[in-house]
Image (cartoon, grey):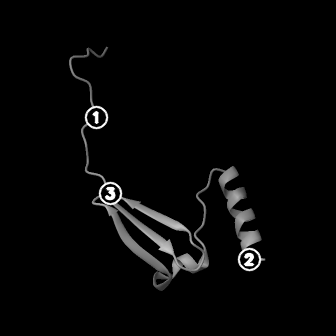
Amino acid sequence: MYEFFWNLANRIRHALGKPCQVRRCCKQPANVAIFQARPDLTVGICVKCGSRHFDLTVDPGVIGLRGAKLG
């Protein structure tokens, strides 16, 4: 019953443009097994429900235009 209402609430939150909530079992650190997939990507998998949680770390970059005249 909890799963049904949790899924329904997250669908409504998504439709309203709000972020989804994490399940109760995933909030407990003892339930999440964490492993390093790549040097910049950490994946946590909940042992109770099987949900995957991703944590990506990126270095800051430079965004800009070269040689373009503005104005």
In the image, 22: left or right of 1? left
| In-image side of 3 versus 34 (left or right) | right
Q: Earlier in the sequence, mark 2 or mark 1?
A: 2
Q: Nearer the viewer, residue 40 or 69?
A: 40
What SS does tag 3 mark?
loop
Few, some or many C-alpha atoms within 10 Å of disc 3 (few <14, some 14-19, many ≥20)? few
Residue under circle 3?
57
Question: x and y percent of residue 55 in the render?
Answer: 40, 62
Q: Nearer the viewer, mark 3 or mark 1?
A: 3
Q: Residue 43 versus residue 4: which sits nearer the camera? A: 43
Q: Quadrant of residue 2?
A: bottom right
Q: Which residue is mark 2?
A: 2
Answer with mark 2 or mark 3, whichever residue precedes in sequence.
2
Q: Which mark is residue 46?
A: none
The amino acid beneath tag 2 is Tyr
Based on the displayed image, in which of its 4 quarters is residue 13 positioned? Answer: bottom right
Residue at (76% x, 70% y) in the render:
5
Badge 3 or badge 1: first in the primary sequence: 3
* Residue at (40, 74) in percent of width and height: 34
Q: Which numbered mark, 2 or 1, is in the foreground of this view?
A: 2
**Residue situated furthest left in the rendering:** 67
Answer left or right for 34 relative to 13: left
Q: Does residue 1 sit above or below 38 in this rendering?
A: below
Q: Can you identify the residue that label 1 sits on?
A: 63
Q: Is residue 12 above or below residue 34?
A: above
Q: Is residue 39 left or right of residue 54?
A: left
Q: What's the residue type where badge 1 is placed? A: Ile
Under circle 1, the secondary element is loop
Q: Tell me if label 3 and label 1 are in contact, CB under 8 Å.
A: no
Mark 2 element type: helix
Q: How many marks?
A: 3
Distance between mark 2 and mark 1 Cα atoms: 45 Å
